[in-house]
Image (cartoon, rainbow, N blue to C red):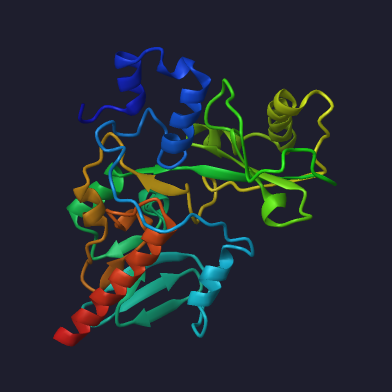
Amino acid sequence: AEGVGVSEVLAASFPDFLDNRLRAFMVSSFLAFDLGDLDELASTLYDGGDGFGGPEVFVTNGYDRVAAHLADGLEVVVGDPVVQVVDDTTGVTVRTASGDHVADAVVVTVPLGVLKADVITFDPPLPAATVEAIDAVGFGNADKFLFMWDEPFWDDTDLIVYTPDRLDVFAYIVNLDALVPGSAALITFAYADEALASESRTDDEMIELMMVHLRDVYGPDTPQPRAMRRSAWGVDPFTRGSYSFPSTTTEMRHFDQLATPHGRIHFAGEHTNREHFASTHGAYLSGVRAADEIMAADRQT
């Protein structure tokens, strides 16, 4: 039903569905992980958007290589938070904590979580339809955990799948050693509400949770990791979450509205791509679209 979450539909129509651990894993890993918490994920829009062709691959030398390639030859300023964007019809001024940057046009690519936090003011104010879309589209969270050992003890396979009673945390495990031989590391995830909860837990608490799962698979003598690294996108003031999803308050037109220019202010990011939201390729394609908009506007002036 419209405006109803996936979890409510499952509870009403298939009350025993998630009692099966394998089914629960599939729902958790391919809905909650890819989109958002099942309480908030719209039951009528969970399959919104389109797939993207081609094989699935891992970037084994760092995802930042993509950004570094795209930024080649550009002046990039970091560590200078934007507080205001002003369009005075002759140009756009981006105001930061340390000063102003003036341009003919601007592309705002901050995550939807930052827009929801309303920490950047726009002059003139954003249209009511855009404000509505910012509020209506869901913004989920997914955190990555890297666990390192002196040597592997696990199966020689790309992925290790575990079906815990507790959903949305440490079930989908990537064998990094298969991708980067000698790394002796596993990567796993917490997502949806479990990601937010994990960010308030200590490293020792998260290591112990991982070990509960691994000991269930490999036995009580499974060794402790020598180190762990983790993300915390939900509490990061420059992200405030990970990626968008169609929530119970979302209509697909809201993604289009988030992509709509406001004078000389343009918008890009995965949350502005109706077909490929919640994806890196969706973010990239939205940047191409915004650049095309600016060039088209220039040709008309």
Vertical side of 54 occupied by 244: above or below: above
| Residue 250 x, y percent position in the rendering | 25, 41
| Residue pictured at 38% horizontal, 47% vertical | 244
Q: Is residue 24 left or right of residue 257?
A: right
Vertical side of 193 occupied by 144: above or below: below
- Between 99 and 188, the residue placed more toward the observer is 188
Q: Is residue 192 left or right of residue 61?
A: left
Residue 244 seen in the figure: yes
| Residue pictured at 68% horizontal, 34% vertical | 206
Vertical side of 96 occupied by 241: above or below: above
Vertical side of 252 occupied by 105: above or below: below
| Residue pictured at 60% horizontal, 35% vertical | 198
- Between 96 and 192, the residue placed more toward the observer is 192
| Residue pictured at 54% horizontal, 46% vertical | 235
| Residue 47 x, y percent position in the rendering | 30, 40
Work out which residue is located at the far left of the displayed protein and give it: 300
- Between 243 and 27, the residue placed more toward the observer is 27
Q: Quadrant of the C terminus?
A: bottom left
**Toward which corner of the image does residue 181 lie, by quadrant?**
bottom right
